[in-house]
Amino acid sequence: MGGLLKEIYKSRTLYLFISPFYILFLIFSVFPIFFSIYLSVHKWDGIGEMTSVGFKNFSYMFNDPVFWQALVNNIAIWLLANGPMLVCALIVAFIINLSIVKFKAFFRIAYFLPNITAMVAVVIIFQSMFGNEYGLVNYFMEMVGLNKIAWFNSSTGVRVVIAVMIAWRYLGYNAVMYLSGLQRIPKDLYEAADLDGATMFQTFTKITIPMLRPIILFTVMMSTIGGFQIFTEPQVLAGNQAPYPGSETIVLYMFREGFIYQNYGYAAAVSWVLFVIIGLISILNWKFFNKSDD
Amino acid sequence: MTAKKIFVHTFLLIGVIFSIFPFYWLIVMSTNETSAIFAFPPKLTFGNYFMTNYNHVMDNINFYRALFNTVLIAVVSTTLQLFFNSLTGFTFSKFKFPGSKVLFYLMMATMMIPAQMLLVPQFIIIKELGWLGSYKALIIPGMATAFGIFWIRQYALAIHDDLLEAARIDGCNKFGLYWRVALPILRPALAFLAITTFMGVWEDYLWPLIVLTDTSKFTLTLTLQQLKSVHTGDYSMVMTGTLLATVPLIVFFLLVSRQFIAGIMEGAVKS
């Protein structure tokens, strides 16, 4: 015991070196975790008395159609955006990685560029392209013989617009992630496949996908966590008005309850439900991607 | 073989068009009048209204003030993060002390907490500390991050122990080992961390929206949102503001892109 204390004393400078993170962690993470558990079973506007309400915040939430709608919107936007985007990112990465492709550095930068744009700017740019009546996208759609779409009048329309923003901003980022995995696949695997006369498609499904599984899992996890934190897109899209149909998300719901109506207890309860949802989906992802491991 | 070559390059170029077009459109809109864009067919070429739009932006928001605020916060945040993250990361990589393993895994576990989850209690703490409306609220909570520490630690593991031993024999204390031996070696890892931190601050929206109260202290993203929600009619002006706010970061990115993308790829493999 004395030996341990002596060890600790000898390492005092080292504890000092690592202390900033842990001090901030205590103040801005550990304390908030317990405080938000406490808040979630109270009613509090930030100024008056806190009143204990038991699980009423949760039962109110589960009976609030707006909350369920937000959850549905969240899942819909997340699937619309990330499903197609991750598949495209994988294909793009696979092609950039082919030995016959020239200007690899140029392609990497060009695809990555959208990720550098702040989401607020992305929303402003894309909103101007998707008009209800006039607008660039409707113009192009008429040019190829499709009907105009009143994008902001239907939930599906709004969700597609938001999904396009997310897909545009993150495709290159995910492609770069996949590329880093692809570069670690041994070249002789591909050479062997080539000798056996495998087609590009066979190489892709039989070698690339299985070898990339850990990185695919990582990107799916990250986009799941990101998908349930969607806030900027619907909030900036609607400005100071109510969100467009189909675009209210859980974080937006929590933001409004907490920071506009000052229902801090209720907002804390919402954030716990959000945490559980993200946790459950992460476990499902993990199970799903590990199951096929035989 | 050549047909295949042409096919894959065409495919990639079509993708590049999709990824670059919104930037082109941003410039088109910033150089035209609003009416030209909402005309049918819309104008797709550059116009010469940029200065008019630019002056409208300057009349409506204090753009350069917001730019200054953003750069200031980004530079201070980045500097502090580089220091604290590298000191902690280096300590974890090269020293063993009671509890070092547990503390390290505890730190790694914090990466699993989604940021939005603690928004309400963090806001209340900031309010109680009297930091509401102050840049302290943006800078201090993020001064040391689990990701940054982990990133530096992975890189610092490669520092040779003989090098540290030699410096110790020469009378270097622990901080000296960090400052004089490790820091120069860690430069590439620090560069990547600096770029991500800087960009993260530039793009941040929700947290500044909650803790900043005074419009004169607003960062670029908040100012843009303000410009958009007040002046929905003049879309060309809003786009010009967006262009002005986006260009500095893109220029910065193009300057450091190789290093940055290499860093991301390395990170993907490590995690």
Image (cartoon, rainbow, N blue to C red):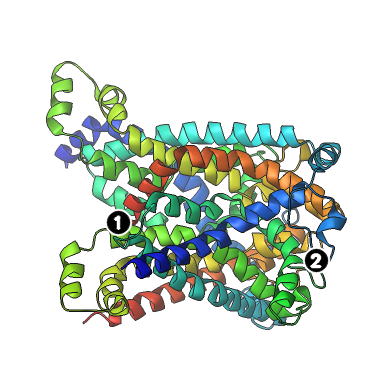
Chain where mark 1 sits: B
Q: Position of residue A109 (x, y in %)?
A: 46, 50
Left or right relative to B45: residue B35? right
Up-down: is A118 above or below A279? above
Q: Position of residue A238 (x, y in %)?
A: 77, 64
Amino acid at pointer 2: Pro
Chain where mark 2 sits: B
Q: Position of residue B201 (x, y in %)?
A: 57, 43
Q: Position of residue B163 (x, y in %)?
A: 16, 27
Left or right relative to B133: residue B36? right
Up-down: is A233 above or below B95? below
- For the residues labelled 1 and 2, the Cα–Cα distance comes to 47 Å
> Residue drawn at (52%, 64%), measured in percent from left and top?
B14
Q: Is residue B221 visible?
A: yes
Who comes first in sequence, dot 1 or dot 2?
2
Left or right relative to A73: residue B50? right
> Residue drawn at (61%, 77%), measured in percent from left and top?
A71
Q: Nearer the viewer, residue B220 or A132?
A: A132
> Which one is in front in this view, the residue at disc 1 or the one at disc 2?
2
The crowding category of the residue bearing disc 2, from other C-alpha atoms within 10 Å (few below 14, some 14 to 19, many at least 20), is some
Q: Which mark is residue A28?
A: none
The residue under label 2 is: B41
Q: Quadrant of residue A70?
A: bottom right
Q: Is residue B232 visible?
A: no
Q: Nearer the viewer, residue B93 or A157?
A: A157
Q: Nearer the viewer, residue B140 or A189?
A: A189
Q: Which mark is residue B269?
A: 1
Q: Quadrant of the C terminus of chain B?
A: bottom left
Give the SS element for disc 2: loop
Left or right relative to A16: residue B234? right
Amino acid at pointer 1: Val
